[in-house]
Image (spheres, helix red, strand yellow):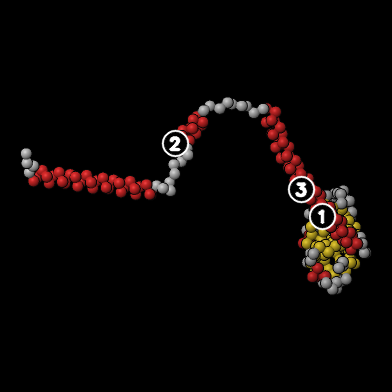
Amino acid sequence: MKINSTLKLTLLLLLVMSGAGTASAYLAYQAGTQALKGVSQPENNPTKKLTEGSKKSTEPTEFKPIDEKTILIKVYDHTHKKNKAAASEKDKDKQSSNTEDKTSQLSQDKTQQGETSQTLAGLPLGVQDQGVTLEVNGATNEGTTLSLNVNLQNEGTTPVKFLYSFLEVKDNQGRSLSAITEGLPDELPANSENFVGKVKIPLALVDDSQSLSLNLTDYPDQKLQLNIAQIPVIR
């Protein structure tokens, strides 16, 4: 039986293809082996670790309540430390405040001592008319102002009214000086207590003055004449 040429060609092609496929597979295997020479298999399976971890996390744990005594001790320590810190801060503030008060008191005492030493020369001076007494018992420098400390008292039986814009202040050269009053009442009641106030004069007006005089009368009758002269100028 003769095999025709077509069948021979077909078989030849099959053999060539099989050989080529076998050769390609061999070369690919060799190339893969060379590429994986530096790679080693992990000692443990990663998926196994994940499985074990999930098992542990889902396993129920035993509930252990905290001892009440331990809680109370911690709360006491926290509160005690907080209160102690607050008390310490309060003590510091108190000590600082006491120090400032003492310093302020000492400064005030020194100032009062200095003012007192200035108010003694030639004073007090006073005058009385119809039961009304006007007295200058001190003079002090208050910044840019000469302050005369005055007392007013009505021992009469009728009230007396004053308008202090009528108060006349002059120096020893006869010059009229502007002045304001502070703390003096507009009306002195009968049989009244002693009222304390001030007459304030700018120091710039008395730079070259040696003494001052005050003249106060009632309003509107102007029957009283309360005149005080030779009031020393304190510098």
Left or right of 4, for residue 77: right
Q: Label 1 vs label 3: CA separation?
A: 16 Å
Label 2 near label 1: C-beta < 8 Å? no
Amino acid type, label 3 = Asp
Q: Which mark is residue 47?
A: 2
Left or right of 175, for residue 39: left
Amino acid type, label 2 = Thr
Q: Quadrant of residue 68?
A: top right
Looking at the image, which residue is at 23% across and 48% down? 20
Q: Which residue is mark 1?
A: 104
| Element carrying mark 1 | helix
Looking at the image, which residue is at 49% across and 32% down? 52
Number of numbered discs: 3
Looking at the image, which residue is at 89% across and 67% down? 232
Q: Position of residue 194 (x, y in %)?
A: 87, 51
Q: Which mark is residue 93?
A: 3
The foreground one among 88 and 7 is: 7
From this view, report whether residue 173 is shown above or below residue 129: below
Query: Of marks 1 and 2, which one's residue comes earlier in the chain?
Result: 2
